[in-house]
Amino acid sequence: MPPLIRAEEPKTFRAPENVEFIAARELRLSRLLIAYIATGLFFMLLPGTFLGVWNLLAISSHRSAETVSPAWIQAHGHAQVFGWIGSFILGIGYYSIPKLRRMKPFALWAPWASLAMWSSGVTLRWVAGVYQWHWRTLLPLSAALEIAAFLIFLPIVSSHPPATEQAASRRGKLDAWILVVITGSIGWLSALVLNLLSAGVLAWRGASPVVPHGFDQPLLVLETWGFLVPFIWGFSAKWLPIFLGLKALDTRKLLWAVALNSAGVIAALLGRPLVSSLLLLAALSVAIYGLRLFEPSERPAKTKGVHVSFPTFVRLAYVWALVSSVLAIWASVTNNSDGIWGASRHALTVGFVAMMVFSVAQRVLPAFSGMRLLFSTKLMFVALLLLSLGCLLRVGSEVLAYQGFARAAWSWLPVSAITEMTAVTIFGANLATTFMQKSNRAELQYRDAA
Ligand code: HEM
């Protein structure tokens, strides 16, 4: 098997005369990135959102969350977290982390193999959950494929930069965002390992592919707060100071936030939801403080090529994360709080994670995918606006309806589902059309200079 990382960096790799080599590699990396993003968009739309909407319509028409099979709910959650966001992070990670860390070039067969394993793993997980077809075989097989794909990713993004770059890094203090992303990777690997263990146990002695509720809930905290959240904080630390013109990142506070966040995830895994929710709220508050997100900006935001509302939606996403943690505290001290937990989860997954992806992905992906411009900044705005409205309706009506505070709220749930579905469809269409356009190097260089 060829090595993942070349033992010797070709001496000519960054030499000016080797421009053609660099251009050809850049093209291949862009194609790889587009393949990952297209895979993520597929999982987001069909197995993820459409199944989620279907579930929500069924819940709303029967006025009870119990009417939908937990296997379908879990299939939706897995497709969104791993199929959509996981594929995006893998693609952006393979494309950008080695470059940002000025690492040696890696063999490109590896991320393609990783994509094949990752997408088959997530697809098999969905088939096992929704159709229950040969699920005793497919469930562990899918979990093993996902881990195999991740184990290709990890060494590529975590190998050491060449000695000269290490010295440069040390001078500028080892980048905090890398440490945050490493924590997210540990959370991701832990979630995949627990997923494999639970798949093995279910295949051996379970009656169905459904992960028992008591185990599923802490596992969801690990998947969201232990994996998705640190990755978003890491990329926020790297890109938001530039994109939003923020004051310099407070590294110490960000690292404290990561430590508190890890403690919160561990508390959830140990079955202490209240302690966990309090720690997660503290972690998030410190992270926001460290990112200096709500302090006056030092420079104007870079909004050329995206909608001017971009900085507002990024900040709104962090407000949704705060809402999610406050709801989680409320749920922890309330009996029969499924509606509040559901609202908290979607405030985080839709309000924070999806809103950050809608904002930042449309900012960076057109350039990463071969120097393109986003197809439509207006569509970007419409998608973000609809996502915000859908999320507001969803989070509000889930608490009111599921907890029995207002019966009328049952009929708002379908409206929220269709609004969110329209938002993700517009987002997907905007990105897909962007990738189909020809690249526009000159305009983009002008934008980055501006
Ligand atoms: C876009 C519109 C979406 C709709 C209509 C939707 C719908 C649903 C529904 C009906 C449930 C069942 C539990 C409940 O009622 O709260 C659910 C659970 C879940 N959703 Fe969503 N969802 C959407 C987006 C997302 C996104 C973007 C993510 C992640 C990035 C996500 C992740 C999850 C997870 C992790 C669960 C829990 C699964 C489990 O219990 O194991 N959802 N969703």
Image (cartoon, rainbow, N blue to C red):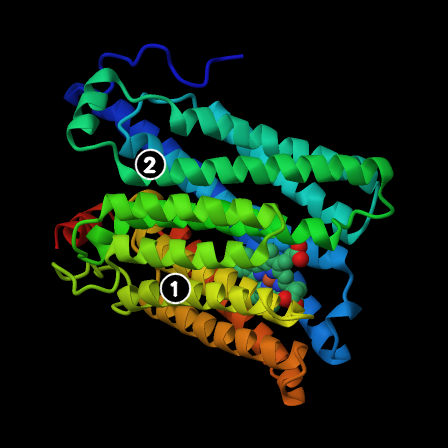
Q: Is residue 443 above or below residue 138?
A: below
At 23% from the left and 55% from the top, the residue drawn is 243
Q: Is residue 418 above or below residue 293?
A: below
Relative depth, front residue between 437 and 365: 365
Can you see residue 286?
yes
Between disc 1 and disc 2, whose residue precedes?
2
- Residue 317 marker: 1
Which residue is disc 2 drawn over?
178
The spot of residue 68 in percent (x, y) is: 76, 66
Quadrant position of the C terminus in the picture: bottom left
Residue 374, horizontal then vertical, whole percent: 33, 57
Is residue 262 shown left or right of residue 364?
right
Badge 2 crowding class, 10 Å Cα cut-off, few under 14, some 14 to 19, many 20 or more, is many
Depth check: give the residue in front, 275 or 372: 275
Q: Quadrant of residue 70?
A: bottom right
* Residue 114 horizontal/vertical position (percent): 54, 31
